[in-house]
Image (cartoon, helix red, strand yellow):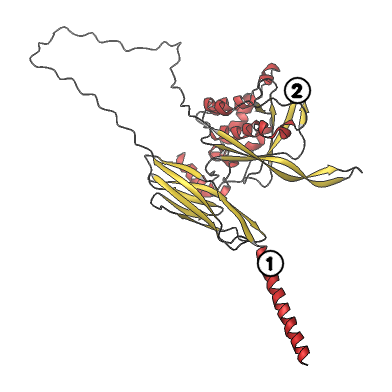
C-alpha cells in the first residue's frame, strides 16, 4: 500500500511538472520579436504657428498572438509631446530643442523583458521675416532757395509688348533620395515538369526610398532622377543587379512626388515633372509623345475631383491612410517591390519592361506600374499609360479632412 501511495505521489508531481513546462512553452510562443521607429526626425515650427504635429509609424513584430500595442513617452514634453495613435505616434513640436521619444511594447520579449525603440526629435523654430525698413523722407533746408523752374515728370518705364514679363526663378533646394533594398518573397504560380501549376515562394526585392523633401519643381526633380549602370538587355537583369538598379524604384517614387506637386492653379509645374519622368531619349527618337495633351487632360480631370489633388500623391507614402487624411509619416518614405513575374521585352524600345508594385492603404489590392531603363541615357522612365491607375479612384479620406479642404478652398 505504501508503495502504491508513493507511486501515486510521484505521478502527480510529474503531471504537475509537465503541465508547468507546457504552460511556459505556450507563453514563450507569444512574445515580441522587435519594435522599430525612425531613429531621427527634424520638425520645423513655422513662425505663424505655435506647434506642429507629425506622425511616425511604429512597427511591432511578434510571435504568435502577442499584443502589438505599445506606449510612448517623451523625455522633454515642453519641447515635444507624444501620444499613441493606432500604429503610429503623433509628436507635437512645441519649442526649439531636442527630445527623445521612447516607444515600449506592452508585451514582453522571449526572455520576459521590455522591448523599446527611441526616436530623437530635433525641433527648430522658424524666424519671423524681418520687416522692411521704411524709407526716411527727405528733409528740405528752409534756407536753401527753391528753383522756380517746373520739373518735367519722368515717363514710367514701359515694357515692350513683345517681351514677356520676367518671372522669378523657382527656389531650388538640395533634394536627397536614398534607397535601400531587402530580399523578401511572395507567393506565385510556377509550372512543374508535368505542366501543372503549383504555388511557390518567389524571391524578389522590396525597396524603401527616403526623401528629405519631395521635389516641388522639375529643377529639384532632376537632381535625383539619376542614371543607373547600364543593364544587359535580358529578362530580370534589374533584379539580378540588385543595388545597381535602384532607379526602377526611385522613378516610381518620383512620380508620386510629382503628383504631390500638382496645383490646379498652376498645373504646368506638375506637367513639367511628368515630362521629365515620361519622355526619354528613346521616345523622342521614335517620335512617341508619352505625355501628351490627352495625358494632361486626364490628369487634371482626375485630380480636380473633390480636392483629390490634396491627397492622391500622399496616398502612396508610408503612414498615409484614409483615417488620417492620407498624411504620410516622416521621413517621407515610399515602399515598393518587384512584381513576382519576369519582365517583358519591348522590341520597339529595345529594352526590358519591369513591373513595380505598390501596396498602399487606399485600396484593397496592389497597384502596378511599368518602368524601363532607357538604353541611351541609363535613366529609368515610366512606360506607356501604366501611370493612370495611380490617379484612379481610391478610398475616400475621413470626412473631417474633406470638410477642412472645402473650408480652405472657400
**Circle 1: element type:** helix
What residue is at 43 percent from the left and 53 percent from the top?
75
Quarter of the C terminus within the rendering: top left
View extreme (top): residue: 149
Quarter of the N terminus within the rendering: bottom right
Residue 384: in sight, yes or no?
no
Please say if 331 is above or below 142: below
Please say if 84 is above or below 278: below
What residue is at 76 percent from the left and 22 percent from the top?
348
Which residue carries the number 1 mark?
A: 26
Q: State the image coordinates of residue 385 (x, y, percent, origin top left).
A: 68, 30
The span from disc 2 to disc 1 (Cα, nearest Å) is 57 Å
Q: For this view, does 36 lie left or right of residue 364?
A: left
Q: Nearer the viewer, residue 342 or 287?
A: 342
Q: State the image coordinates of residue 315 (x, y, percent, origin top left).
A: 58, 42
Q: For this view, does 155 lie left or right of residue 329?
A: left
- In the rendered image, which quarter is residue 30 located in? bottom right
Q: Nearer the viewer, mark 2 or mark 1?
A: 1
What crowding class fits label 1: few (fewer than 14 Cα within 10 Å), some (14-19), or many (20 or more)?
Answer: few
Mark number displayed over residue 71: none
**Circle 2: element type:** loop
What residue is at 70 percent from the left and 22 percent from the top?
375
Which residue carries the number 2 mark?
A: 350
Amino acid at each position: 500500500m505504501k508503495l502504491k501511495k508513493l507511486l501515486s505521489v510521484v505521478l502527480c508531481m510529474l503531471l504537475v511538472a509537465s503541465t508547468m513546462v507546457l504552460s511556459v512553452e505556450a507563453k514563450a510562443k507569444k512574445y515580441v520579436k522587435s519594435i522599430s521607429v525612425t531613429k531621427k526626425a527634424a520638425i520645423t515650427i513655422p513662425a505663424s504657428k505655435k506647434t506642429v504635429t507629425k506622425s511616425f509609424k511604429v512597427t511591432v513584430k511578434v510571435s504568435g498572438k502577442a499584443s502589438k500595442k505599445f506606449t510612448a513617452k517623451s523625455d522633454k514634453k515642453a519641447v515635444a509631446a507624444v501620444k499613441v495613435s493606432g500604429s503610429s505616434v503623433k509628436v507635437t513640436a512645441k519649442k526649439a530643442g531636442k527630445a527623445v521619444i521612447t516607444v515600449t511594447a506592452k508585451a514582453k520579449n522571449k526572455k520576459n523583458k521590455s522591448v523599446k525603440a527611441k526616436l530623437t526629435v530635433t525641433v527648430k523654430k522658424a524666424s519671423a521675416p524681418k520687416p522692411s525698413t521704411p524709407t526716411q523722407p527727405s528733409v528740405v533746408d528752409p534756407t536753401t532757395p527753391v528753383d522756380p523752374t517746373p520739373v518735367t515728370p519722368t515717363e514710367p518705364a514701359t515694357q515692350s509688348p513683345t517681351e514677356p514679363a520676367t518671372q522669378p526663378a523657382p527656389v531650388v533646394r538640395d533634394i536627397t533620395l536614398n534607397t535601400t533594398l531587402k530580399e523578401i518573397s511572395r507567393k506565385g504560380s510556377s509550372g512543374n515538369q508535368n505542366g501543372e501549376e503549383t504555388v511557390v515562394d518567389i524571391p524578389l526585392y522590396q525597396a524603401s526610398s527616403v526623401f528629405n523633401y519631395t521635389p516641388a519643381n522639375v529643377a529639384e526633380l532632376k537632381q535625383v532622377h539619376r542614371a543607373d549602370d547600364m543593364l544587359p538587355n535580358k529578362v530580370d537583369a534589374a533584379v539580378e543587379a540588385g543595388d545597381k538598379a535602384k532607379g526602377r524604384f526611385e522613378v516610381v517614387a518620383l512620380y508620386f512626388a510629382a503628383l504631390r506637386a500638382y496645383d490646379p492653379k498652376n498645373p504646368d509645374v506638375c506637367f513639367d515633372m511628368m515630362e521629365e519622368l515620361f519622355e526619354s531619349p528613346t521616345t523622342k527618337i521614335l517620335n512617341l509623345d508619352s505625355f501628351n495633351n490627352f495625358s494632361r487632360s486626364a490628369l487634371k480631370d482626375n485630380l480636380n475631383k473633390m480636392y483629390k489633388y490634396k491627397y492622391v500623391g500622399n496616398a502612396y507614402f508610408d503612414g498615409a491612410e484614409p483615417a488620417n487624411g492620407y498624411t504620410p509619416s516622416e521621413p517621407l518614405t515610399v515602399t515598393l517591390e518587384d512584381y513576382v513575374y519576369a519582365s517583358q521585352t519591348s522590341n520597339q524600345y529595345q529594352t526590358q519592361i519591369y513591373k513595380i508594385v505598390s501596396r498602399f492603404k487606399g485600396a484593397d489590392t496592389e497597384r502596378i506600374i511599368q518602368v524601363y531603363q532607357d538604353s541611351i541615357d541609363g535613366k529609368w522612365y515610366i512606360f506607356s499609360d501604366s501611370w493612370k491607375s495611380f490617379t484612379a479612384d481610391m478610398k475616400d479620406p475621413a470626412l473631417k479632412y474633406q470638410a477642412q479642404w472645402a473650408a480652405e478652398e472657400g
